[in-house]
Amino acid sequence: MKITITGTGYVGLVTGVCLSDVGHQITCYDIDQEKIDLLNSGKSPIYEPGLDELIQKNIAIGRLLFTADVKEAYSDADSIFIAVGTPPNDDGSANLSYIESAAIDIAKYITKDCIVVTKSTVPVGTNEHIGRIIQEQLPADLKVKIVSNPEFLREGSAIHDTFNGDRIVIGSDDQEAGKTIEEIYAPFKLPVVRTDLRSAEMIKYASNSFLALKISFINEIANLCEKVGGNIEQVATGVGLDKRIGNKFLQAGIGFGGSCFPKDINALNHLANEYDYDFKILKSVIDVNRLQKERLFHKAKETLGSLSGKKVTILGLTFKPNTDDIRDAASLKMIQDLLLEDAVVTVYDPVGMPKVEKLYGDKIQYGSSAEKALENSEVAFILTEWDEIKNLSLETFKNYMKKPILFDGRNCFKLEDAENHGLQYYSIGRRPIV
Ligand code: UDX
């Protein structure tokens, strides 16, 4: 069986590489020749632990090919997985133009009957739309069946998540097509949920929205803990041990970012509006997250009076650790707010700095290490819980900063330690150390 994956972003690349690793013959197709050249040289265009090694291994075995040639990609394909981006439009809806042009190409270049599998996150009804586009352009002697197969991998642990996912969702209105795709995934030995097309599309949005809801909820409990007294770490542990709730995604912090949650909850909200449904909880999740991202900045302003002219350090720029992705990261809002305040901003991140430098150039400074970034600083913010940052000794803040005032958006340190080191320490959902 020849499988082609269209789009070599996070989802497409990781899926393609993992499917080849369990023994399938995979062709990864992308219109970006530069990306394809890089991949053919065994290097991943994205930072993802373990991915380069798996790419090199499967290229060497001959099970993994990369091409920018659309004919090579689609002719002879038995199934084509679409994993192109669905970025947000200005109104929050999902932009389907990449999906639509993939569908047109598929109709144009396939030479035999084929199953088209949508892995991209798409609004309910999109798979039917893809089917119609393909059908309109398809030669009369060919047949295409459509399957929705949403993806649940997390950046930074994408390979682990693919091999150890909680479930594989396969949605199709054609039982046989669904069965064929189920067989492709059989080597993963994971639970399979078979649904109709529209339910599979909804599962993806509902899952991401529910996880985002959990985060916003615990963030609000954290904010309340700060007011009424209480420690969010202890509260989350106590709450999370209830198996009906579960202990995952209860880490209070500076709000969620990344390429999925913000985009997907906005797209679901937009979909609800289109169907004239007022999705109240979802709107609150969006609002709470926006406010959470500004919270530490306002706390710092309240504490210091003004940040104008002060040297401020940000440790951690990516939306989470183990990725170079800064999409919708809290750091971007923080940098913007600090610059408006005329603060002198120095940043440090183990891998995220080049992308931030592209956005802010010489408007901010870049430390070559956490220590360098902290030198003579009056305020420091921790925005991403990289191990390297969590493992900094609190002595470092004391030794390098002018005044060690720390705003920790990821609760990286114990309150007792901050107290023992004489730091002024503010975290999320815990009493301040002053
Ligand atoms: C998410 C989903 O988890 C994944 O299933 C989906 O396929 C894509 O979107 P990802 O965005 O890669 O994955 O990262 P995730 O680990 O879910 O974190 C998203 C954001 O939530 C990050 O900013 C993270 O810091 C934040 N988060 C996560 C919290 O603030 N608290 C938590 O308890 C968990």
Image: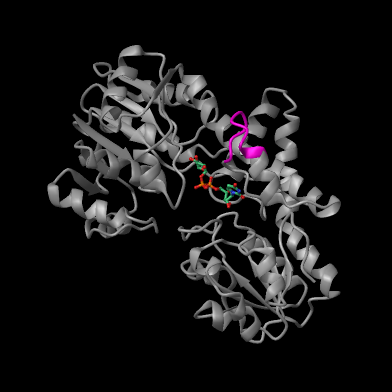
For image coordinates 74% across by 62% down, the residue present is 296
Kindly indicate the quadrant of the structure image that contains residue 300.
bottom right
- Residue 84: image location, x then y, percent: 42, 41
Residue 240's x, y, as percent? 62, 39
What colour scheme has been applied to the protein in the rendered image? Answer: one colour
All told, the count of numbered labels is 0
Q: Is residue 323 one of those drawn in magenta?
A: no
Q: Nearer the viewer, residue 63 or 305?
A: 305
379 to 431, vertically: above or below: below
Q: Is residue 135 left or right of residue 255?
A: left
Q: Residue, x 40% and y 36% (percent of image)?
A: 165
For the magenta stretch, what is the residue range? 239-247
Query: Which is more toward the observer, 219 or 333?
Result: 219
What is the chief secondary structure element of the magenta stretch? loop
Residue 91 visible here: no
Q: Quadrant of the N terminus?
A: top left
The C terminus, quarter of image: bottom right
